[in-house]
Image: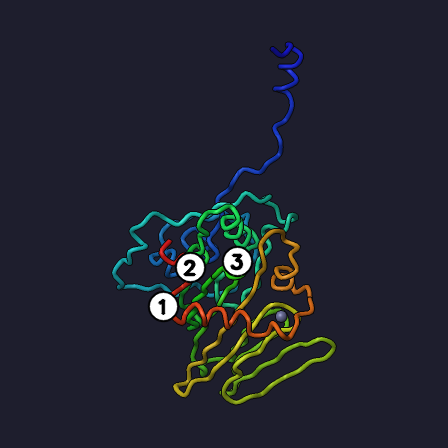
Amino acid sequence: MPSRMGIRHLFSRPPPSKPSPWQANLPCVHSPADGCTHHNPHHSPIHFDPHLLPKNTNRDAPPAQRQPHQPAPRSAREPPQELFSALPRTPASGSLALLPHVHQTVPYSLAFYHVHGVMAQLRGGVRPQLSRLACAGMTGAGVRWVITPVISGGVLMLEYALAFAAEGGDWDVRACAHVRMGVKGGRARFERRVMGRREEWREGKEVEAVCCERCYTDAGLRLRTDGVVEVRIYKDLGQGLHPDDPKWSAAAKGVDLKRDTKDFGRMKGRFQELRAPEEERTGFDEAD
Ligand SMILES: [Zn+2]
Ligand SMILES: [Zn+2]
């Protein structure tokens, strides 16, 4: 039986500082009724915590194009998709750091806590909630976008599939901090920063693969004969153990690393393998 002193000591001591789980924003949510066509097709009220985003995130982007006259999809009748994190909820911790947008109008704000969350589920033997990170939509600027996450080889990979009309603007897609691609005057344009020098392409129709050697990004662009530009970007975001993970730091903060050229095309190849048996497959927890 503890002494009275002991009991008082026990109760006056602060509890061990283990952060309790907090509800996170979905990567497509930037306001209280925001969300992509997968997660919030009717722009219903949805969980939104403004403290998780930097103040001016997505402010300059036009609102997502609404999809009127569509029957409510199955997902709209289901409970809202929730996402939780137990990481420190402060900017200084690095948990809230975001992957830069690949196009200024594509409203996908993936944070480190998202990567950590699904990878922690995998490590804990729980089915990762990858569908929380799978978003799609059409921007007010006419960019159709689909983002597909998969876990492969112990890392989280993302595929961005963008499509837009070549006419109607000068398109500037930032595959990563080092690779830009787009269309200007009806011609496909590519630019890649490589170690120690700058390179630029002016190919007419497509570049099948532009692989970054300063971060884990593969990308490609195709100008179709019907005037539609298709862009694919693939990223390896690492194991999600710590915000200083070199792969995450390279992707989110542009901290350069040296990628072996033997690794070029790995992420693109992995998505192609996953799709091979079934074109519509979206990752191994698509039924979630
Ligand atoms: Zn979404
Ligand atoms: Zn890069």
**Disc 2 element:** loop
**Disc 1 element:** loop
* Pointers 3 and 2 in contact (C-beta within 8 Å): no
Question: What amino acid type should be assigned to the residue bearing mark 1?
Answer: Glu
Separation of residues labelled 1 and 2 (CA atoms): 12 Å
Residue, disc 1 = 280
Say which of 271 and 192 sits in front. Answer: 271
Say if disc 1 is inside 8 Å of ligand 1. no
Tell which residue pokes out farthest to the bottom in this image: 204
* Pointers 1 and 3 in contact (C-beta within 8 Å): no
Which image quadrant for residue 226? bottom left
The disc, 1 or 3, on the residue closer to the chain's N-terminal end is: 3
The disc, 3 or 2, on the residue closer to the chain's N-terminal end is: 3
As displayed, is residue 209 above or below residue 57? below
Residue, disc 2 = 284
- Label of residue 110 in the image: 3
Q: Position of residue 65 (x, y in %)?
A: 38, 66
- Label of residue 133 in the image: none
Q: Position of residue 275 (x, y in %)?
A: 41, 70
Camera sees residue 196: yes
